Image (cartoon, grey):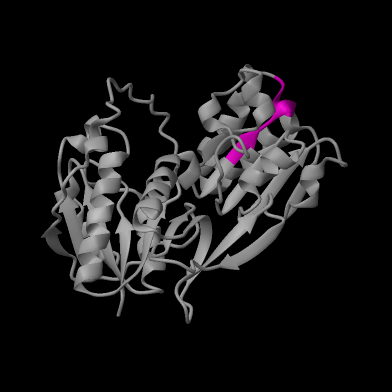
């Protein structure tokens, strides 16, 4: 069976959830071979093996932390060449983050292959993997495949359930020669983001978002309270972040982050196309808005016409009561 390279997104050896989802999808089209790079790469093998990696290629070097993107592209290219020389390579899968999409694009260019970004599903096809995408603000669903070279595909978080599938997970050292361009852009400093204790927005199973109807930064406390009762991440519309009510890092929409949680709760959000483009693939959508004609109600599974300042606190208390 052909092998599928899976780029591992990890923090000092702790594998992040989108990578485990990629391993689930990779098993549909071939045998997953994980590529773990940087500090802690050697500590990822147990988790990766538990979720289906038949092999784990590792390489630790300071360049991955000290310079932007290119060292990781060099390493993935080396992995592609190594696997291709030893057998057949069905695809390369990368998490669909901002960095992931840049890595994938650069890799596809180097190896002369096509690229598909923001896939939400993957299946085996007679002529190679077939990727499903949600396009034009989720108005259409398309299926496509790469017609040239080894498919390079980025997959949105929450596109597949994480499934345990114990495999060998044999660890092999990857030989990497960094290119001259690898050290072209140096990282001069880092400032850790202050932790809120909530899930990462793009990876969360539940997202609670507030919009213009929240009417002020101080009122986002009720959005946060509902999110905390559900163990959810907090999002915001472009109108809310542009007004300075919530950080831009939490913006959901076409110019913000795309999310696809199991449950999305939109409070005081009208549902402009810009916002819908970032959340319309959510599995279940609930909207709370006092305007019964708000466009958001066109795509929801459940809608509540009412004042969010009455509905959201009541919902929070109900959630707490049922949990307690």
x, y (%) of residue 162? Answer: 40, 62
* Observer able to see residue 56: yes
Q: Identify the image quadrant of the N terminus.
A: bottom left
Q: Quadrant of residue 66?
A: top left
Q: Nearer the viewer, residue 265 or 271?
A: 271
x, y (%) of residue 120? Answer: 53, 59
* Residue sitting at x 51%, y 41%: 232
Relative to 84, 277 lies left or right? right
**Magenta region: which residues?**
208-215
x, y (%) of residue 304? Answer: 78, 44
Relative to 281, 29 lies left or right? left
* Observer able to see residue 18: no
Relative to 107, 131 lies left or right? right
Residue 209 counted in the magenta span: yes
User: Where 31 falls versus 126 (above or below)?
Assistant: above
Q: Nearer the viewer, residue 88 or 161?
A: 88
x, y (%) of residue 156? Answer: 49, 53
Residue 159 counted in the magenta span: no
* Residue sitting at x 20%, y 36%: 63
User: Where 275 falls versus 154 (above or below)?
Assistant: above
Q: Can you name the residue that lies furthest to the right here?
A: 293
Q: Nearer the viewer, residue 195 or 311?
A: 195
* Residue sitting at x 47%, y 62%: 160
Q: Nearer the viewer, residue 254 or 162?
A: 254
């Amino acid at each position: 069976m052909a092998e599928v390279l899976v780029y591992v997104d990890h923090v000092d050896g702790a594998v992040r959830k989108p990578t485990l989802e990629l391993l689930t999808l990779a098993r549909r089209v071939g045998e997953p071979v994980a590529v773990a790079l940087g500090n802690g790469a050697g500590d990822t093998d147990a988790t990766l093996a538990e979720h289906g990696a038949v092999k784990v290629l590792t390489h630790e070097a300071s360049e991955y932390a000290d310079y932007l993107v290119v060292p990781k592209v060099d390493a993935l290219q080396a992995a592609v060449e190594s696997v291709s020389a030893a057998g057949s390579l069905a695809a390369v899968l990368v998490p669909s983050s901002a960095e992931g999409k840049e890595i994938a694009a650069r890799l596809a260019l180097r190896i002369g292959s096509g690229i598909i970004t923001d896939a939400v599903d993957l299946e085996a096809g007679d002529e190679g993997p077939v990727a499903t995408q949600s396009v034009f603000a989720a108005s259409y669903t398309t299926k496509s495949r790469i017609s040239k070279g080894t498919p390079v595909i980025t997959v949105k978080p929450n596109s597949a359930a994480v499934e345990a599938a114990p495999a060998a997970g044999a660890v092999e050292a990857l030989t990497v020669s960094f290119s001259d361009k690898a050290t072209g852009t140096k990282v001069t400093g880092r400032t850790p983001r202050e932790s809120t204790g909530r899930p990462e927005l793009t990876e969360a199973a539940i997202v609670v978002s507030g919009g213009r109807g929240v009417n002020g930064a101080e009122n986002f406390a009720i959005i946060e309270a509902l999110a905390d009762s559900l163990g959810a991440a907090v999002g915001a519309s472009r109108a809310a972040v542009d007004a300075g009510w919530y950080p831009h890092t939490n913006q959901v929409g076409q110019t913000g982050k795309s999310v696809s949680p199991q449950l999305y709760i939109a409070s005081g959000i009208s549902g402009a196309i810009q916002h819908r483009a970032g959340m319309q693939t959510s599995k279940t959508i609930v909207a709370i808005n006092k305007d019964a004609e708000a466009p958001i109600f066109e795509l929801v599974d459940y809608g509540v016409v009412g004042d969010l300042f009455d509905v959201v606190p009541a919902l929070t208390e109900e959630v707490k009561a049922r949990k307690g």
